[in-house]
Image (tube, rainbow, N blue to C red):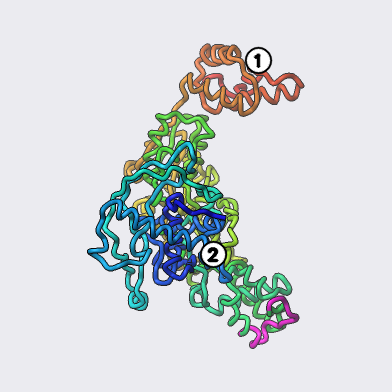
Amino acid sequence: MHTIEHPETLLAEEQAVVQLAAKNRGIFEIATRSDTHGPAIRAGIDKLYDPADPTYAMRCCETVPHLIELQLIRQSEVPKRFQLTNFGWQLSRNLTAKLKEERQFAGADVASDTPPHDPMQMTAPIRREAEELTPTSPEPAFGATIPRAIVSESPATESHGSVPSLVSPTPPVSITRTPPPSMPDFGGKKRVESGLVSSLGLDEGFLPPEPQTLAETGLSSAAIEDLILKIVQNAGSMTGRQIAEVLCLPLAVLEDCLTTLRNRQHLSPTGSAMLGDYVYQLTDNGRQRARLAMQECAYAGPAPVPLDDYVASVEAQTIRTEKPKRARLVEAFSDINVEPEMLARLGPAISAGKGMFVYGPPGNGKTTIAQRITRCFGQNVLIPYAIIEDGQIIKLYDAACHERVNSQMSSLLRHNEHDQRWIRIRRPTVVVGGELTMDSLELKHDPVSHISEASLQLKSNCGSLLIDDFGRQRVNPTELLNRWIIPLENRIDYLSLANGKKIQVPFEQLIIFSTNLEPHDLADDAFLRRIPFKIEIGAPSREEFIKLFEMFSKKLKVECPSESLNYLLQRHYDSCGRPLRRCQARDLLDQALHYCEYNEIPVIATPEILDHAVNNYFTAMSGKE
């Protein structure tokens, strides 16, 4: 049983959800529409959305599981629709009473200037940090301006497609008072877990709604029918829901196509399935048409999305929209040793989202640092499985380049979350080295299957493209740089389809050139000015090398006494002038570990074992680098 005496113990967004529901007879829903650019809580003509704060709608959506846990709301029979419980109605009345009390306390004479308002028009809750409230840490006295993040649309506005207008806000009230002596906890966590946003699928500004009609897919009925026939031919027999699952489209969208194929005697229902569905097989006419469709294009997978939709998605999810700060960089590089001075140089380059040269002697962590740069950008992105343009299908999703995010989707939002033709991935990091050729930068058309494979820069959109060991590719560096001068300048690229048509695609990635060579030896000034950041990663200092040895000693569980480390530095570095490299600490300790394991002796890096490791490691080298 709840005793809701102090509503301010709830987060501002949680209070806003309850107030919005109370205004609409206790009912609200989570819906994705174009005017909010993603999911938002709606009740009648109102919605929790703030154009000045794009994350506000998302924060309100993620409070739903906690409000259900507190028994303030419950899920209705309609998917993604919720209603207030008795406790929720009680909280709504307390919020209204609290507002009146605060106004009286602040001396605000609102009633004399404006007619009575309902709870939603009177206030939006006071924003506070989502922190745990404990008896030993009472809530501080607060003085805040009441924000307005509730958008109201009149029926006339909706019918004409106009931009919704904000509800006229109540005059700001500055409140400073002593909080109640105790803040009861309703149970459950007050802090929203950082992974909850991703698990609910609400961490992206771009969220394409699930198509409700064939026209909304952007595909022709003939293209959908060919895909259905090819899928059934490959499987032998399938139910309508299985076909819809493979195509990543709702069954309701495919009903007309399935009916047309049955009427034309291309599909034949051979049995019934659950919920009024049927099991389908190809007829002789269907097999003939499927063979012709397979000869034209062998693709038989999730329905592709139009190129224009993909271009819009890249513009909405571009890596330049995120501006990682120092704390994000520290977290991304926490598992490796990076000096504060290096972070200070890398930070502005990463935050800018523009290209960079990372250069310096080999073995100092250029590739390691470059591969971790994408970790600084926290959001996941949505990409389509395949793209279609002028009848040509381009496969975009590549498991070798894209890390799929297995969303632990709450059942609250599992129904019709978004267009399932889009897959949620981490911002990609595409790494290529000496194998890079000019052909890798173009669409790869298979003359047998008639399916095109996306180019490297297309796969790396909204992420990072790392050209490792730049200058050592089989292709001349000048040709490679000339290929990218225009894309780097204009952020667009031009690719050729198999039918000869040129298409314009986004070039929206953080491109990183990692090289052991001097940048001026590889490119002229015209290209270097388009790569604004040049980061030199030099050799480590003696202190940093010792710190690396200690770090890898703990990581590899190899005991390395300080006497052994001093011996190593004096005997094998100082005496012969060998330069220090960051990779050597890990590599030498790894040699010592395998030596001890093989000889079944304690894992201790003694001077003798380090001599053995050095002899193995540097034998192929000249002794001086």
Residue segment shown in magenta:
260-275
Q: What element carries label 1?
A: loop
Q: Residue at position x 68%, y 77% from top?
A: 275
Q: Which corner quadrant holds the N terminus?
A: bottom right
Q: What residue type is labelled 2?
A: Glu
**Residue highlighted by disc 2:** 417
Where in the figure is residue 423, as x and y percent of width and height? 55, 59
Considering only vertical position in the picture, is 145 above or below 239? Answer: above
**Residue highlighted by disc 1:** 606
Q: Which amino acid does label 1 sit on?
A: Thr
> What is the distance, in whole Å, between disc 1 and disc 2 at their CAs?
59 Å
Q: Nearer the N terminus, badge 1 or badge 2? A: 2
Q: Quadrant of residue 149?
A: bottom left
Q: Is mark 2 on a helix, strand or loop?
A: loop
Frontmost of labels 1 and 2 is: 2
Q: Residue at position x 37%, y 45% from top?
A: 352
The crowd level at tag 1 (other Cα within 10 Å; few <14, some 14-19, many 20+) is some
As drawn, the residue found furthest toward the right would be 600
Where in the figure is residue 388, as x and y percent of width and height? 51, 68
